[in-house]
Amino acid sequence: MTQKAAYSQAAHTGKYDKSSGLLGKYDNVRRFWEDQVTGIFLRSPLNALVERKRQRMERIRILDLGCGSGDGYDLLTGVTTKDPGIYEYITATLTPDMIKEYVGFDINEDLLEQAEAYYGHLPKVRFIRGDMSGGLPDSIKDESPFDIYFTSFGTFSHFNHSQTVKIIADIARHAADGAIFMGDWLGRYSYEWQDLWDQPANKEYFMDYRISYIYPEEERDKAEVAVFPLRLVSRDEVVAMTEDAEKVGDARINPVTFFDRSIFIGRHMDTGDYNKNCPKLRGAVNSLFEGYVRTDLESLLVDYVPRPGFDHLNNFFEMLFMCSNTLVKHTIHVLSLCDSDTDGLKSVPDPLPFYPDPLKEAMASMRRVIEGVGWVKWGDVRSNVIEPQLGYSLRKLEMDLQPGMGMGHGLVGTFEIQK
Ligand SMILES: C[S@@+](CC[C@H](N)C(=O)[O-])C[C@H]1O[C@@H](n2cnc3c(N)ncnc32)[C@H](O)[C@@H]1O
């Protein structure tokens, strides 16, 4: 092979493409915020399940419903045991040897082809094509019970109330005792789609969901954007569906936790498709996590615009964004003192006593990180250490302050099936 042919072959594999965490499905926010937050909330029930199975000398069977490209495999094997000590190397609670089988299920053959390409070489991974809109199909019902019934990133928003009840009832019937079920929907009251808050809360509502965010801003107007219906739900609607599913089955579906994911950085923050007042926070947070790229920290400040008639939602968003603004301004201030003299940091004001505890904690952490590394003269510690830490601190603020009611891009519920 000539060198020209070798380079051309490499280019055609796609593996020569420029990689960046600033845009696309696997942007930095997806990997370092959304996947991680999901894993942190799953940690406790997953740890308990793994421990129980280990004691019984059994391995774990996983069903990933609406698996798409099979990303659930990485997400689940990336959940950590606890806040691991800094000296520990293996931190995963679910190591591949503890998996008996991971079965991915999806309707879309192109996505399953991609899933096969990414994960098909793993010996305990298998994919099945089928439609679950009428409940779990026979191809799944004929399988042995699973220990985890997993969905992610809005999969349940493809279905209406009665379809969802049927799927959940089938899961409860099929599951092993003590199995974990995780349901993932789009939240009804995300700031991203504030224009849609007026829809009556007592009626099912499907938004016209635009996948416009995959295009760079300058191409969005000209692109042929795919649009399809996705259901927006509140926690009350999720509870109603699981209660209805419980009535038709013979198992208990016990809620473990509900959480709002991506309140701050949902994908439609930057498109403005459903709320022109949204700040472009996803792009800014992608930049925080990107190595050797400095971020204009002022672009993280939010001037929240309330919607009349929704006081409780406005109060929540105003509180959250006031906290994030305070953290960002604090970080800008502490950074500005680094370049002055060595004693400059002593003049950083303490957080005020009435600030919420998560904000106080985040401010103290950012100060300590900057004090600890701000003096290092190589490796651009601002973009490579301090900015990612600000990203993690904003993420923690969102996690600690979210109410799990449907105020984020995603609303997730985890449940334990009791037989
Ligand atoms: C929002 S995507 C989530 C994909 C993936 N879990 C992820 O984390 O990126 C929803 C997935 O549900 C699948 N899906 C939609 N309707 C379905 C149906 N009726 N039966 C099975 N899968 C379905 C879609 O093909 C898509 O892969």
Image: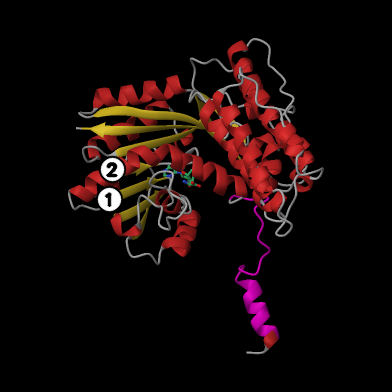
Queried whether the magenta region covers residue 125, the answer comes back as no
Instruction: State which quarter of the image contains the C terminus.
Output: top left
Res. 137 in view: no
Vertical side of 278 occupied by 366: above or below? below
Q: Secondary structure at mark 1?
A: strand
In the rendering, at what x and y percent does residue 361 appear?
57, 31
Which numbered disc, 1 or 2, marks the residue closer to the eye? 2
Magenta region, residue range: 4-25
Asked whether 291 or 25 is in front, the reply is: 291
Q: Residue at x 69, y 27 (%)?
A: 326
- Label 1 Cα neighbours within 10 Å, binned few <14 / some 14-19 / many ≥20: many
In the rendering, at what x and y percent does residue 274 appear?
68, 29
Q: Would residue 163 be found to the left or right of residue 325 on screen? A: left
Queried whether the magenta region covers residue 10, the answer comes back as yes
- Label 2 Cα neighbours within 10 Å, binned few <14 / some 14-19 / many ≥20: some
Vertical side of 75 occupied by 359: above or below? above
Q: Residue at x 73, y 47 (%)?
A: 223
In which quarter of the view is residue 221 placed? top right
Q: Which residue is mark 2?
A: 49
